[in-house]
Amino acid sequence: MKIIKNLFQFINQSITRKYLYIFTLVLIIPIILIYNLIIGYAEQTIKKDIVAQNRSSTDMIVKRLNTEMTDVVLQLQLIAGKDTDTQLDLDRMYTQSKQAITQSSIIHSIYFLDQSRKLRFEAPFDQKPSLLYYDYPNFEQVRWSHNYAVSDNIQNYWGVNVVTISVPVFSKNKEFQGVLIAEVSKDYLSEVLKSVSLSKGHFSYITDSSGTVIASTAENQIGQTFSLQVLSGFSESMEINWQKERSVAAYQAMQDGWDLVYGVPERIAFEPIHKLSFALRISFITIMVLCLFFTWLGMKSILYPIIRLTEYARTYHPLRTYIPLNENKKERPDELGLLTNTIINMGNSNYEKQKMLEEKERYLYDVLEGIPYGIITINQESIITYVNVQFEKMVHHKRNDMIGIHLSDLPIKSETGDFVLLQTVNSGKQGEEMESNIVDAKGNKRIIKITTSRFYNEDLQTIGIIAVMQDISQMKLLEARLKQSDKLALIGQITAGLAHEIKNPLAILYGSAEMLLEEAEESECSEEIKELSADIYVVINRMKDIIDNFLNFAKVNKKQRENISLQSILEEIIHLLRVKLNETKIQIIRNYENDSYIKGAYDQLIQVFLNLILNAIEAMPDGGSIIITIREENIDGQGNVCVIIEDTGIGINEQDLEWLFNPFFSTKESGSGLGLTIARDILAEHDGELKMVSAIGKGTITTCRFLKEEITETTSGNV
């Protein structure tokens, strides 16, 4: 491919070479076509004659051999006859067999096998042979079909390859007596083929049903096997290899499974064509050489002026400036001289127009690239033709990857019907300003305001559509944040009344749970009931503390602190959530490097870690694992304790991650949006911090960092 490309470049560099090649092709192609038409027509004519001759010869051979085979069957049936009693007259059969062999050239010998497959006579050689048995392949076929059979190339009882025709022998009362077999003379079959194949080089052969040659004009082919394509009936022409030569042959199926092929090698058949082809080739080459010579003489006076004109063109294009005419040089008064002057003047005129057009294109390009909105254009086939740099930043795809592809193939939409540009193309209406959404290459969903407009050619036909997009994602988030702030103000007004109404029934539940726990411990109930009673008391007590924390949300919590084991808190939460963990098929993996202590409020820390672990469980609806790690770190000489909760859930996108700790913001449909806010504030009261790292499809890692508390002998609290 590269060689052809270089050849075309070499030709196009010179008009002399180009026109020589053009006129050469104009002469060569018709000559080649005429030559091929003549030779092709002659070949088809000769081939039709050969096919007709092959068909006639094949038909004649098949009719003759079928007739002779039928005669052999009739003679065998006459010899077999029907005796008057159950005893066969073998002498009569032997005598008649000898007469049949004498009268028919196709029969080589005739012998009879009785029911036990014993040889009873072989005409004309042995009337009463000694004890000899022969397992004739077609014996059972003839016995049960009650009809004659023609065999393939088989071995007789002497081990000689023969072909046979056999008929059954029955007594008067139709009892099977044996099989009368006639061996067909292969030499006679070959002589029949040779007698018909009189023309020079023609050949023919007969094969049995397995493809073995049983007779042929070439004796060395007898016994070989040919794989012929199975054809039905008569085939006028087919191409085969005969003795390593390509040949044209006819094929016809004979009766009783034999096949006949008659043909002639192409070398002999098309010998007249080869002579005609050589004569035509010499004539056409002579004509072509003479035409090329006279063409070169005639073009000489035209090519030189054109070459001079191309010199002007080469000078004009690189300089991109005015090219003055050479007034001292005499110009041609004919059409070529006028063409030269006109082209130079047109080039000088177009230079200024081209310069102005390039300046306007550059100005328009700078304007589109400088607009702080994303711009994209498509043609009538919805192929992207242009995007500006702001659109690149908006979708995080490279410009070269977007230009030239169909708009629906741009991976910024979940469905093709969402494309406003495509809706504008299909509807035929002018686009209006509307809001839509896209997904960038990083998976972030963006809310955009899009305006579409058509642009037209000079015939007022639509040639494309332009869309201007403004990313209003942050604006929408700010609006949502403002609405959440209004909610927060409203919630603050009803907090006191709501807490009062909840605390009263909660106090009753707290007292009842305490009494239930005491009764369970004093009575002889099961350990499971005692354990559940303790769980109820602990949970109601934690609910009471949560209400108190909610009322003191904006106040500084002065609750008494104590040294607390983080491992004990986490194990208690895992114990409380054991049923939910089993139901959701979530596995807890503990990675406690050591049992670290911090100073804090026990109930508040229970609230923090319970909230975080519940969030991890809800992020894995199909099950998974939660890895809980406790490790110590040293940052700037200060000892810290980190609790890391890592899940294998669905993850959180980058935009939602920025708003997680804002009150009333939740990624769950039924979430209140206060859990993480309260957890962050509780950790802040404990001089700690809460951080979250997440990505879609990769789970979430939550890190709680506390100041390490040294254990003293007076350490107390829940451990």
Image: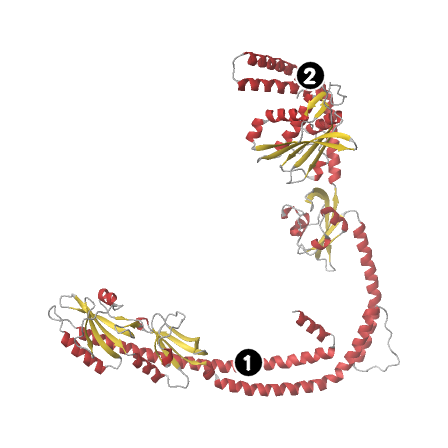
Gap in angstroms between the C-alphas marked 1 and 2: 108 Å
SS label for mark 2: helix
Q: Which residue is mark 2?
A: 500
Q: Which class describes the residues within 10 Å of circle 2: few (<14), some (14-19), or many (20+)?
A: few
The answer to whether residue 556 of the structure is visible from this angle is: yes
The type of residue carrying mark 2 is His
Instruction: Give the image location of residue 240, x and y in percent.
Output: 44, 75
Instruction: Give the image location of residue 346, x and y in percent.
Output: 81, 71
The type of residue carrying mark 1 is Asn
Question: Which label was assigned to residue 229?
Answer: none
Q: Which residue is mark 1?
A: 36
Q: Nearer the viewer, residue 623 or 592?
A: 592
**Image check: 500 left or right of 534?**
right
Q: Nearer the viewer, residue 515 or 286?
A: 515
Check the image and report above or below for 320 versus 440. below
The answer to whether residue 671 of the structure is visible from this angle is: no
**Image check: 55 left or right of 658?**
left
- For the point 63% across and 48% down, which residue is it? 416
The extreme left residue here reads: 85
SS label for mark 1: helix
Instruction: Give the image location of residue 18, x and y in percent.
Output: 71, 77
Q: Mark 2 or mark 1, which is nearer the start of the sequence? A: 1
Check the image and report above or below for 30 versus 662. below
